[in-house]
Image (cartoon, helix red, strand yellow):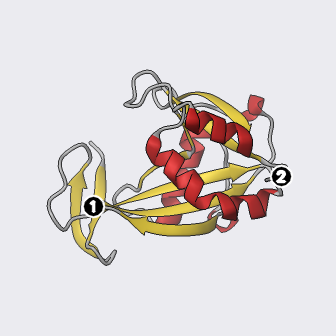
Amino acid sequence: MELNDIYDINRRLTGRTHVRGTPWKKGEYGLVVCVWVYDGKGKVLLTRRAPEKSGAGSWENSGGAAQAGESSLQAIVRELREETGIVAGPEEFELLCTDRDKICHYDFYCLRRELPLAEIKLQPGETDAAKWATFAEVHRMIEAKEICAVIARQFLRQEPQLLERTKAPI
Protein backbone atom coordinates (compact mmCIF):
# COMPACT_ATOMS: atom_id res chain seq x y z
CA MET A 1 0.00 0.00 0.00
CA GLU A 2 1.47 3.32 -1.09
CA LEU A 3 0.63 6.49 0.81
CA ASN A 4 0.81 10.01 -0.59
CA ASP A 5 0.76 13.28 1.34
CA ILE A 6 -2.39 15.35 0.95
CA TYR A 7 -1.96 19.02 0.03
CA ASP A 8 -4.52 21.80 -0.12
CA ILE A 9 -5.18 23.95 -3.20
CA ASN A 10 -2.32 26.29 -2.18
CA ARG A 11 0.11 23.36 -1.92
CA ARG A 12 0.26 23.37 1.86
CA LEU A 13 0.59 19.98 3.55
CA THR A 14 -2.54 19.03 5.47
CA GLY A 15 -0.86 16.46 7.72
CA ARG A 16 -3.06 13.70 6.28
CA THR A 17 -2.24 10.92 3.82
CA HIS A 18 -4.05 9.34 0.89
CA VAL A 19 -4.01 5.67 -0.11
CA ARG A 20 -2.89 5.42 -3.72
CA GLY A 21 -5.59 4.09 -6.02
CA THR A 22 -8.49 5.43 -3.95
CA PRO A 23 -10.52 8.51 -4.98
CA TRP A 24 -9.36 11.93 -3.87
CA LYS A 25 -11.85 14.00 -1.85
CA LYS A 26 -12.81 17.50 -2.93
CA GLY A 27 -10.09 19.96 -1.93
CA GLU A 28 -7.39 17.28 -1.63
CA TYR A 29 -4.35 17.30 -3.91
CA GLY A 30 -1.39 15.00 -4.44
CA LEU A 31 2.05 15.82 -5.80
CA VAL A 32 3.31 14.43 -9.11
CA VAL A 33 6.81 14.95 -10.49
CA CYS A 34 8.10 14.50 -14.07
CA VAL A 35 11.51 14.92 -15.68
CA TRP A 36 12.70 15.46 -19.23
CA VAL A 37 16.16 13.92 -19.51
CA TYR A 38 18.01 15.54 -22.41
CA ASP A 39 21.40 14.84 -23.94
CA GLY A 40 22.50 18.36 -24.93
CA LYS A 41 22.52 17.26 -28.58
CA GLY A 42 18.83 17.69 -29.42
CA LYS A 43 17.31 14.52 -27.98
CA VAL A 44 15.13 13.64 -25.01
CA LEU A 45 14.85 10.27 -23.29
CA LEU A 46 11.51 8.47 -23.57
CA THR A 47 10.40 5.26 -21.87
CA ARG A 48 7.55 2.98 -22.88
CA ARG A 49 4.88 1.90 -20.40
CA ALA A 50 4.94 -1.82 -19.63
CA PRO A 51 2.05 -4.09 -20.76
CA GLU A 52 0.62 -4.37 -17.23
CA LYS A 53 0.31 -0.58 -16.79
CA SER A 54 -2.62 1.61 -17.82
CA GLY A 55 -1.74 3.22 -21.13
CA ALA A 56 0.43 0.20 -21.96
CA GLY A 57 2.74 0.70 -24.93
CA SER A 58 2.62 4.49 -24.88
CA TRP A 59 5.81 6.53 -24.57
CA GLU A 60 6.45 9.10 -21.84
CA ASN A 61 9.04 10.87 -19.76
CA SER A 62 9.94 9.57 -16.30
CA GLY A 63 7.94 10.56 -13.27
CA GLY A 64 5.25 9.65 -10.80
CA ALA A 65 3.60 10.44 -7.52
CA ALA A 66 5.56 11.63 -4.51
CA GLN A 67 5.24 9.21 -1.60
CA ALA A 68 4.25 10.37 1.88
CA GLY A 69 7.13 12.23 3.49
CA GLU A 70 8.98 12.89 0.23
CA SER A 71 9.83 16.32 -1.09
CA SER A 72 9.42 17.01 -4.78
CA LEU A 73 13.16 16.59 -5.38
CA GLN A 74 13.35 13.37 -3.36
CA ALA A 75 10.46 12.00 -5.42
CA ILE A 76 12.01 12.84 -8.80
CA VAL A 77 15.39 11.38 -7.78
CA ARG A 78 13.62 8.13 -6.75
CA GLU A 79 11.28 7.95 -9.76
CA LEU A 80 14.08 8.47 -12.30
CA ARG A 81 16.31 5.88 -10.59
CA GLU A 82 13.46 3.34 -10.34
CA GLU A 83 12.28 3.74 -13.93
CA THR A 84 15.63 4.10 -15.72
CA GLY A 85 18.45 3.30 -13.32
CA ILE A 86 19.78 6.84 -13.78
CA VAL A 87 21.28 8.10 -10.54
CA ALA A 88 21.28 11.88 -10.12
CA GLY A 89 21.52 14.13 -7.08
CA PRO A 90 18.75 16.61 -6.27
CA GLU A 91 21.04 19.52 -7.16
CA GLU A 92 21.32 18.25 -10.76
CA PHE A 93 17.62 18.75 -11.55
CA GLU A 94 16.34 22.04 -12.91
CA LEU A 95 12.72 22.99 -12.19
CA LEU A 96 11.02 23.98 -15.47
CA CYS A 97 7.59 24.85 -14.10
CA THR A 98 4.80 23.89 -11.75
CA ASP A 99 1.12 23.35 -12.46
CA ARG A 100 -2.09 22.13 -10.83
CA ASP A 101 -5.16 20.30 -12.02
CA LYS A 102 -8.27 19.03 -10.20
CA ILE A 103 -6.38 16.59 -7.95
CA CYS A 104 -2.63 17.17 -8.29
CA HIS A 105 0.14 19.69 -8.03
CA TYR A 106 2.86 19.04 -10.62
CA ASP A 107 6.55 19.81 -10.73
CA PHE A 108 8.27 19.48 -14.11
CA TYR A 109 12.03 19.11 -14.13
CA CYS A 110 14.78 18.63 -16.68
CA LEU A 111 18.14 16.92 -16.32
CA ARG A 112 21.07 16.81 -18.71
CA ARG A 113 22.54 13.36 -19.01
CA GLU A 114 24.49 11.77 -21.85
CA LEU A 115 24.46 8.00 -21.70
CA PRO A 116 23.98 5.11 -24.09
CA LEU A 117 20.67 3.23 -24.04
CA ALA A 118 22.56 0.12 -22.92
CA GLU A 119 23.06 1.82 -19.53
CA ILE A 120 19.32 2.35 -18.98
CA LYS A 121 17.94 -0.15 -16.46
CA LEU A 122 14.21 -0.51 -17.02
CA GLN A 123 11.87 -1.21 -14.10
CA PRO A 124 9.90 -4.44 -14.60
CA GLY A 125 6.18 -3.74 -14.47
CA GLU A 126 6.73 -0.02 -15.16
CA THR A 127 8.82 0.38 -18.32
CA ASP A 128 9.72 -2.04 -21.09
CA ALA A 129 11.72 0.09 -23.56
CA ALA A 130 13.67 3.33 -23.79
CA LYS A 131 14.90 5.52 -26.61
CA TRP A 132 16.48 8.87 -27.34
CA ALA A 133 14.14 10.91 -29.58
CA THR A 134 14.72 14.12 -31.50
CA PHE A 135 12.15 16.88 -31.14
CA ALA A 136 10.91 16.12 -34.66
CA GLU A 137 10.47 12.47 -33.72
CA VAL A 138 8.55 13.44 -30.57
CA HIS A 139 6.22 15.56 -32.72
CA ARG A 140 5.71 12.62 -35.10
CA MET A 141 4.99 10.34 -32.12
CA ILE A 142 2.48 12.85 -30.73
CA GLU A 143 0.66 12.99 -34.08
CA ALA A 144 0.64 9.16 -34.24
CA LYS A 145 -0.72 9.08 -30.65
CA GLU A 146 2.27 7.00 -29.52
CA ILE A 147 2.82 9.42 -26.62
CA CYS A 148 0.02 9.66 -24.08
CA ALA A 149 -2.03 12.86 -24.28
CA VAL A 150 -0.97 14.24 -20.88
CA ILE A 151 2.73 13.84 -21.69
CA ALA A 152 2.18 15.25 -25.19
CA ARG A 153 0.61 18.41 -23.70
CA GLN A 154 3.51 18.73 -21.24
CA PHE A 155 6.06 18.39 -24.02
CA LEU A 156 4.39 20.98 -26.27
CA ARG A 157 4.06 23.45 -23.38
CA GLN A 158 7.65 22.92 -22.19
CA GLU A 159 9.29 22.50 -25.60
CA PRO A 160 10.63 26.09 -25.82
CA GLN A 161 12.46 25.70 -22.51
CA LEU A 162 13.78 22.28 -23.52
CA LEU A 163 14.95 23.57 -26.92
CA GLU A 164 17.02 26.22 -25.13
CA ARG A 165 18.78 23.56 -23.09
CA THR A 166 19.23 20.89 -25.75
CA LYS A 167 20.55 23.09 -28.53
CA ALA A 168 18.13 21.23 -30.79
CA PRO A 169 17.34 22.51 -34.26
CA ILE A 170 13.83 23.90 -34.63
Q: Which residue matches tag 1? A: 102
The residue lying at 45 percent from left, 27 percent from top is 125
In the displayed structure, 19 sits above or below 7; it is above
* Residue placed most toward the observer, 79 or 30: 30
- In the rendered structure, the answer to whether residue 16 lies left or right of residue 88 reads left
**Residue 119 at what x, y percent from top left?**
75, 33
Say what secondary structure mark 2 lies in. loop
Instruction: State the residue lying farthest toward the top.
Output: 51
Type of residue at label 1? Lys
| Residue 50, horizontal then vertical, whole percent | 48, 25
Q: Which mark is residue 115?
A: none
Q: Secondary structure at mark 1?
A: loop
Which quadrant of the figure has residue 46? Answer: top right
Residue toward you, 56 or 12: 56
Residue visible at 72% across and 45% down? 135
Residue pointed to by mark 2: 169
**What is the C-alpha distance between the residues marked 1 and 2?**
35 Å
Answer with left or right where residue 6 lies relative to residue 124.
left
Neighbours of disc 1 within 10 Å: few (<14), some (14-19), many (20+): few
Quick one: label 1 or label 2, which is nearer the N terminus? 1
